[in-house]
Amino acid sequence: MSGRRLDGARPRAEVPERVTELSADWVLPVDGPPIAGGRVRWENGEIVEVGPGRAERHYADAAIVPGFVNAHSHLEYAVYAGFGDGASFGTWIRTHVERKRRLDSDDMVAIARCGVADSFRTGITTTADYSFSGAGAIAAAELGLRATVYLEVFADDPEDARRRFEEKRALVEETALVTIGVSPHAPYTCSLETYRWCLSLGIPVGTHLAESAAENEWLEHGTGALQDLPVLVPPTGKRAVATLEPVLGPELLCAHCVEVSADEIALLAERNVPVAHCPRSNALLGCGVAPVTAMRAAGIVVGLGTDSPASTPSVDVFEEMRAAIYAARALERRPEALLATDALHLATGEAARALRIDGRVGTLTPGKRADLAVVSLAGSPYHPVEDPAAAVVFGGSPERVLETIVDGQTRYLREEKEQWQEVRSTASAARRRMLAPKP
Ligand SMILES: [Zn+2]
């Protein structure tokens, strides 16, 4: 894979004419009220002005929003969609592992590039990517997606974790946009000592926590749907959150947190543990509904994550925001449990806080990096616009994203339809190999 890094023929995002300002009928800075007829201007990739005004390049019937911050992704699973519809969590994860073994490292990079393309297409400009092979870091660096890439380790013995991490770390490079972190995968695949070693590195650390009832059942009793997995650590006799209690803190980003009791929510809040909420993934795998309203009310910083097509139908931040709203309102039985404007915050400013990069991205604020997306509202039921946040959240879709800008550079333009064709067809070929009948 390191050879791939040096390959001069690798695909690059086409960078069209350089723009340094954009305007639209609406600008939603997220850290302040919507601006009608707003303009965003930047210099050297840094936002210098957000306010009323009109640029030469003006988007009518559209809204400019901060580039979305995806609090949980696996770019290298971009074409793992629909493996065994209706399979239990245990069966699903076994199929996933078996099919992944059919790929080589070039396949993994090809698929991760597709994940980057899908991210740009839905207006995502930053992602928190949990990467099994490191391919996410290579693809993000090549194509210009801002990313914290947490290299995954599965290990009972921290010495194994160190060796596995160093192998993967040697394949990837940090860039101005890509930061390398580490991911002890989950409390059922990593020991507490492995978590302690990961946290000692002083780099970003992310894990999966309390995703399913099966996880608690394995950890407490050593039984249930996970028991045949090849990567398990011994049961701890405690639930997932209690198992990790000694290491919980603001440095440990925790994806999912579906199976959390009121006491566990209080503990996560007390320790300032950031949570990545992935409602579509949790629903599709039949894991449940994370109590996002209760977690936010307790003071937990929650970011929204699309997870990957291995467990969601698509990389679609708009569907994810709507799913968060549906799930929260249905669970709480009240319509104000999560507002459209809350969902927009979960996918931008709060996700940036969860990743601890809110000083740089997440809102349209002078001094932050120029990461933004333009969403068309033309012809939607929300146009003419009454509430621009509701229009973006309920009316938005990847098909309505007109332009995505990272660090002041255009990375996606809807009108350039051919842009990602080769990336997509190479990733499809890798998927075909995964689906081939067993020899
Ligand atoms: Zn995940």
Image: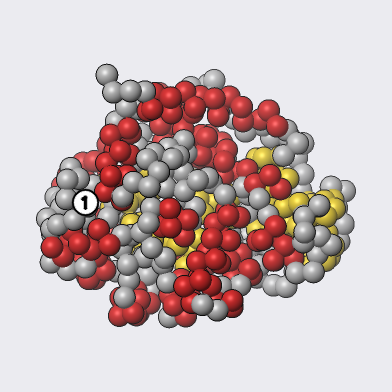
Residue 217 is situated, as x and y percent measured from the top left of the image, at 20, 62
Image-quadrant location for residue 365: bottom right
* Residue at the (68%, 54%) spot, across then down: 396
* Residue at the (75%, 36%) spot, across then down: 415
* Residue at the (56%, 67%) spot, across then down: 325
Element class at badge 1: loop
Q: Is residue 346 left or right of residue 392?
A: left
Residue type, label 1: Leu
Residue 405 is situated, as x and y percent measured from the top left of the image, at 67, 47
Image-quadrant location for residue 192: bottom left
- Residue 338 visible here: yes
Residue 264 is situated, as x and y percent measured from the top left of the image, at 30, 75
Locate the N terminus and report the quarter of the image it occupies.
top left
Locate the C terminus and report the quarter of the image it occupies.
top left
Residue 263 is situated, as x and y percent measured from the top left of the image, at 30, 80
Q: Residue furthest front?
A: 86
Which residue has dot 1 on it? 226
Which residue is nearer to you in this view: 212 or 241? Answer: 212
